[in-house]
């Protein structure tokens, strides 16, 4: 900036000198055409210098604005609590802010301009920084699902200078022509969030375990009294005990859901994959649920596929749990004259598809994005059945995702829903590691 100001002052002095000299020459010169030409040429040069000065003034403003913007951007980057590292395609470091220095334990001055390779992780000083650049080096690094595939989010753990849980987001910096000119790593320290999540899961797991034992004892005590093991009871008392028994049973169901969620989040849901027949598992489940459906006034129907389904690798117990949740929802939210739940199983492309169709209350389109979140229930569902936990669909989604499949839903409020579970025919599509799936 100082150089531009000095140049501007020099041009002003030169301009003033030129104008003064030409005016003096013009007033004293004889009327000779040759000299007049020289004078006019000098005046033209003066005008050109004026235009140059005007352009230089605008240039100074532009440079000042750019300098201000640069300083503001630098201040923002420096004061961010998240770490930022910018690098080229060949992993040459361009920028590093103080937060990234603090998280990774390296100084910007030591790495700016340096190219990094995976082997640099062997050097203790740069081990954590290199793992941030190359998450594949971290054995338990976990990819997080993102709808926008331009960004990659990885969760990993580093041990130097401190043990931390990090979330690393890779963002491509794209030029106007659409070419990736560099990449940006956004580094978030999520150690506290992870600790809180673990504490919450441990508390839920402990509380649920402690609740389940007395609730089970109450259940079987009530059952024995209702069955007459303690002697005859009058109809009014039996009615009250039946209400208590059902309420206790629902409480046990909620406790079991909480335990399942805690195990899913902690990665210890205990999957046991084996080859089996999906249609046979559905048939057994439907037979066990049929009495409950009839009691609720809902027609439950499963017609085995005409063509035998190929056997697939799946966890029978967890699959039955997922399907039970879908059927229970269909029954609870479909208690009206002519209520019906139809289950179909068939091969579709690379998957075995299981559809659960009902003609119940349906789901509003505006609520669809929250459908598979924990403790999430649509307003019309709460009005229809007040005692749901909002955990069932979260459990269903995570079970099927763990199988390498997916859950889809089509619904219209007031007309019913179709929930579809897709299970892969190819066992190689089953993930090796459990990941928690939750919509935000």
Image (cartoon, helix red, strand yellow):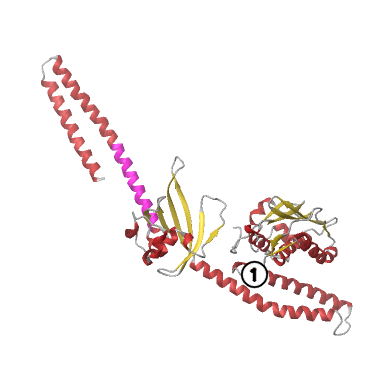
In terms of depth relative to the viewer, which is nearer, 18 or 392?
A: 392
Q: Quadrant of the N terminus?
A: top left
Q: Quadrant of the C terminus?
A: bottom right
Q: Which residues are magenta?
A: 57-78
Residue neighbourhood size for the residue with mark 1, other residues' Cα within 10 Å, grouped as few (<14), some (14–19), many (≥20): few
Q: Residue at x 39, y 61 (%)?
A: 120
Disc 1, SS? loop
Against 115, residue 262 (above or below) is: below
In terms of depth relative to the viewer, which is nearer, 303 or 432?
A: 432
The reply to whether the magenta stretch includes residue 75 is: yes
Would residue 99 be visible to someone looking at this image? no
Q: Is residue 401 left or right of residue 46?
A: right
Against 44, residue 109 (above or below) is: below
Against 367, residue 255 (above or below) is: below
Q: Residue at x 31, y 37 (%)?
A: 58
On the image, the x and y values in percent for residue 389 come to 69, 66
- Magenta part, dominant SS: helix
The reply to whether the magenta stretch includes residue 439 is: no
Q: Residue at x 65, y 71 (%)?
A: 259
On the image, the x and y values in percent for residue 373 come to 63, 60
Q: Which residue is mark 1?
A: 270
Would residue 107 be visible to someone looking at this image? yes
Number of numbered discs on residues:
1
Against 358, residue 11 (above or below) is: above
């Amino acid at each position: 900036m100082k150089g531009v100001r000095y140049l501007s002052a020099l041009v002003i002095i030169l301009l003033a000198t030129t104008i003064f000299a030409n005016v003096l020459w013009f007033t004293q010169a004889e009327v000779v055409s040759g000299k007049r030409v020289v004078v006019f040429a000098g005046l033209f040069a003066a005008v050109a210098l004026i235009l140059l000065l005007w352009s230089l003034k605008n240039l100074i403003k532009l440079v000042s604005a750019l300098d201000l913007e640069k300083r503001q951007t630098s201040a923002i980057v420096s004061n961010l609590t998240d770490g930022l590292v910018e690098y080229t395609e060949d992993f040459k470091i361009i920028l590093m802010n103080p937060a990234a220095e603090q998280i990774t334990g390296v100084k910007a001055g030591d790495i700016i301009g340096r190219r990094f390779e995976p082997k640099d992780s062997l050097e203790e000083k740069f081990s954590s920084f290199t793992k941030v650049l190359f998450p594949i080096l971290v054995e338990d690094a976990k990819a997080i699902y993102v709808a926008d595939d331009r960004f990659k989010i990885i969760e990993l753990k580093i041990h130097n200078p401190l043990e931390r849980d990090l979330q690393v987001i890779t963002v491509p910096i794209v030029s106007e022509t659409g070419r990736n000119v560099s990449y940006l790593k956004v580094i978030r320290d999520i150690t506290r969030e992870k600790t809180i999540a673990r504490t919450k899961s441990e508390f839920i797991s402990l509380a649920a375990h402690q609740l389940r034992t007395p609730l089970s004892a109450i259940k079987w005590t009530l059952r024995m009294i209702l069955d007459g093991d303690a002697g005859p009871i009058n109809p009014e008392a039996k009615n009250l005990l039946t209400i208590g028994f059902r309420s206790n049973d629902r409480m046990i169901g909620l406790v079991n859901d909480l335990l399942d969620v805690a195990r899913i989040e902690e990665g210890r849901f205990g999957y046991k994959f084996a080859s089996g027949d999906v249609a046979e598992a559905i048939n057994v489940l439907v037979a066990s649920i049929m009495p409950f459906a009839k009691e609720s006034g809902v027609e439950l129907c499963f017609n085995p596929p005409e063509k035998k389904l190929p056997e697939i690798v799946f966890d029978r117990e967890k699959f039955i749990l997922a399907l039970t949740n879908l059927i229970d929802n269909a029954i609870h939210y479909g208690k009206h004259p002519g209520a019906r739940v139809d289950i179909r199983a068939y091969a579709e492309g690379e998957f075995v598809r299981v559809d659960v169709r009902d003609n119940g209350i349906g789901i509003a389109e505006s609520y669809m994005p929250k459908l598979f979140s924990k403790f999430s229930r649509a307003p019309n569902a709460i009005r229809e059945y007040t005692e749901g936990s909002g955990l069932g669909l979260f459990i269903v989604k995570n079970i099927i995702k763990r199988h390498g499949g997916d859950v889809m839903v089509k619904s219209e409020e007031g007309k019913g829903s179709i929930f579809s579970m897709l299970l892969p025919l190819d066992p190689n599509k089953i993930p090796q590691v459990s990941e928690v799936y939750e919509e935000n």
